[in-house]
Image: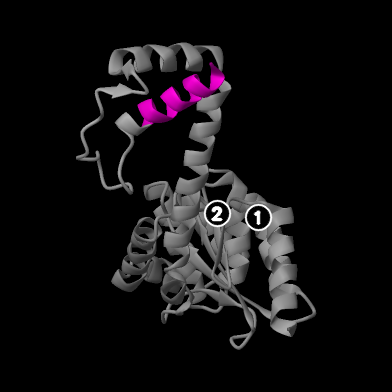
Amino acid sequence: MRFQITTAVAAALAFTACSGGQGQSNVKAPDSVAGLTKAQVEAIVKEYLMREPVILAEAFGELQRREDQQHIAATEANWAKLASVKANDPTLGPADAPITIVEFTDYNCGFCKAATPWVMNQVDDRKGDIRVIIKESAVRGPNSELAAAAALAAQRQGKYREMHVALMKVPANAYTSENIEKIAKSVGLDLARFNQDMQSREVKDHVAATTNMFGQVGLQGTPSFFINGKYVTGFDEQGLNSLIKATREQLKS
């Protein structure tokens, strides 16, 4: 009986399966399976799935896993574009480092704030084999755009790292013009030049372009990291450290 039920389940699933992810199949479902009518098969499937709901959970889990794999592959396909440094992209570490970390970040993201010390530790590693490219993706709205513009304006005075770290210490959604100006002053910026650069078309266009890139490459949250082309979503410190280690070992071989 179990074999008959399993066969019926497989057949019933085939009735509703999509073909290669391209929409519904044009193949007409058979009217009967092993002597059973379609209505009888559907009744058996319903009873079976009600009794064994874990089957559905496993099926949906496998579907999610496959979709995640496809998403990762599609995102990683953008690596060449992501690792290509634009004129105004903030970079930290040696330009010729064999390991490149690209981080999409947002100042209103709590996990981005938590990740900042880890990112700076990679730059300061004595091995000197890591370069970090930070993408100021202001995906959380005008408040984030203001902070991103402030960081890029500070870069024009050679103070990007100091400003970036200081901004990350500010509570989320506290990026007012007054607070940002206080931070700029604390890191030693020329305030007149800083305010002018923040309002410049070049800085605003840079923030907009990086924010658009976030969506174009299929990212869904911050922080998002790429390490020599491998994509890591969120701040998984252990996972990131393991990937750095594996990348170093791969480079040695």
Q: In which quarter of the image is residue 74?
A: bottom left
Q: Is residue 60 above or below residue 89?
A: above
Here the colouring is: one colour
- Amino acid bearing label 2: Pro
Q: Magenta span has 9?
A: yes
Res. 29 image quadrant:
top left
Q: Is residue 60 left or right of residue 112?
A: left
| Image coords of residue 223 (percent x, y) | 55, 54
Assess whether mark 1 and mark 2 are in contact (beta carbons under 8 angstroms): yes
Q: Is 113 colored magenta in this rendering?
A: no
SS at mark 2 in the image: loop
Residue depicted at 36% across the width and 17% down the height = 41
Residue range of the region highlighted in magenta in the rendering: 1-13
Dominant secondary-structure state across the stretch colored magenta: helix
Question: Badge 2 is on which residue?
Answer: 223
Nearer to me, 8 or 241: 8
